[in-house]
Amino acid sequence: MNKKTGGLSIFALWFGAAVSLAEIMTGSLIAPLGVARGIAVIILGHLIGCLILAAVGIIGFREKKPSQVAIRTSMGEYGSYMVSVFNIIQLTGWTAIMLIQAARAMQSLAGDLFNINSFAVFVVFVGILVALWAVCTEKGISLINNAAVLLLIVLSFVMLGSVLKSGQPGPVTGSISFGMALELSIIMPLSWLPLISDYTMSAKTARGSFAGSFTGYFLGSSFMYIIGLVAAVHSGTSDPIAILLGLSMVYPALLIVILATVTTTFLDVYSASMSTVNLAPKLSKKLLIVLYTAVGALLALFFPMEQYENFLYLIGSLFAPAFSVILFDYFIYKKDWSEERFNTIGIIAAMAGTAAYNIISGYDLALGSSLPTIIFTIVVYMVMRKTANILRKGDCKHAG
């Protein structure tokens, strides 16, 4: 990505990334709170998550490096490798989830139209589209992607209007606490933390990087969540495919499924390849894109979608503490660890944060799990660094 990217293109990139069935499905999980409380928690959670996301993007803009290379400044070379491995795992998982959702939707929407009902065929078809979009990413994130996102915006408003006309609000089965709903709203932006710098590193300005990333993902993801929420309240189901089927608009719904999957999932396979290049710089990015798309498609045939919510929480437990250290170290301590193997204290603090996340999540706090984990991780990191400095000074005095 040698060309400089303007703020509008960055906005379109992240808006397109947010327009997906995964966002609609996650928003529908919040429906038991009702429309008013649900929208409030969606906006609050996305404000928090997107501010963190855009702040991490500034690191990539300043360093002019891909995400996993930029992370070395805070985690050290080998520390960045650890984050790369975690990122590859989550991105492969996301690729599988997106292909599953697209294939299931296409089975329902297009099976009768084209007399094809094979889940595997639809997985392969969408996978090929994703790989082609990712291989042509320099063109894809500008004119072509902008046009696709504009079409998605129009289609999404049409879908929302159809949902509102299709029925009256009613009770939704199931329950969810405010804290859990807040967590689900924060986690989605956080899942993009390990890859945002792959795109902001080519931004023209810091303002374009921050504003484009923040507004694009905030508006796009919040809108998708709200569609899922409102659709679930009006239809009584949290299944986005069933919601689309109930709208009696097969062709627009089919176009939404394909475009939303491609404009989101190409980021996953492209950034998985970028993370791998951090581990093995001589490997071909295009070959890796094809490889990760194939792996995601293969995984899609076996991934247990009932574990989707747990998958989201796993992402929060790994990346909320890790990027708390990365942000705090980069903007506050401003020490460059890129020439060292590990930021040992930072890695220990992040591991402590992951453990804390899993403990905190069992208490169902009103603040969710990510915010308390971020605060805890930063405090641990500060205390450990302060202690290390005191011990180091004590050793120097003793030596003197």
Image (cartoon, rainbow, N blue to C red):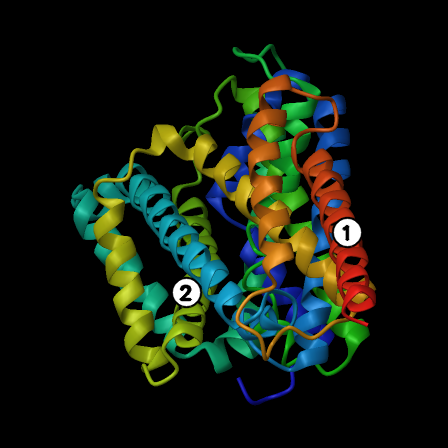
Of tags 2 and 1, which is closer to the observer?
A: 1
Which amino acid type corresponds to the residue marked 2 in the rendered image?
Ala
User: In the rendering, at what x and y percent does residue 58 appear?
Assistant: 73, 69
Residue for point 65% across, 31% down: 369
Q: Residue at x 60, y 17 (%)?
A: 176
Of 361 and 235, nearer the camera is: 361
Amino acid, disc 1: Thr
Nearer to us in this view, 146 or 80: 80
Side of 226 where 276 appears, left or right = left
Residue neighbourhood size for the residue with mark 2, other residues' Cα within 10 Å, grouped as few (<14), some (14–19), many (≥20): many
Name the disc covering residue 14, or none: none
Q: Are marks 2 and 1 in contact (CB under 8 Å)?
A: no
| SS label for mark 1 | helix
Q: Give the residue at x 28% y 44%.
A: 110
Q: Residue furthest bottom?
A: 2
Vertical arrangement, residue 265 with respect to residue 189, above or below: below
Residue 254 x/y as whole percent:
39, 48
The residue shown at (77%, 30%) is: 40
- Callout 1: few (<14), some (14-19), or many (20+) C-alpha neighbours within 10 Å? few
Position above or below: 264 against 311: below
Q: Is residue 98 left or right of residue 344?
A: left
Residue 353 visible at all: yes
Disc assigned to residue 272: 2
**The image quarter in which residue 356 lies:** top right
Q: CA distance from mark 2 to mark 1?
A: 37 Å
Q: Give percent across and percent down for residue 12.
A: 63, 66
Pointer 1: what residue? 387
Task: Give whichever of 319, 61 is nearer the camera.
Answer: 319
Q: Residue 112 placed where, x, y %?
A: 22, 39
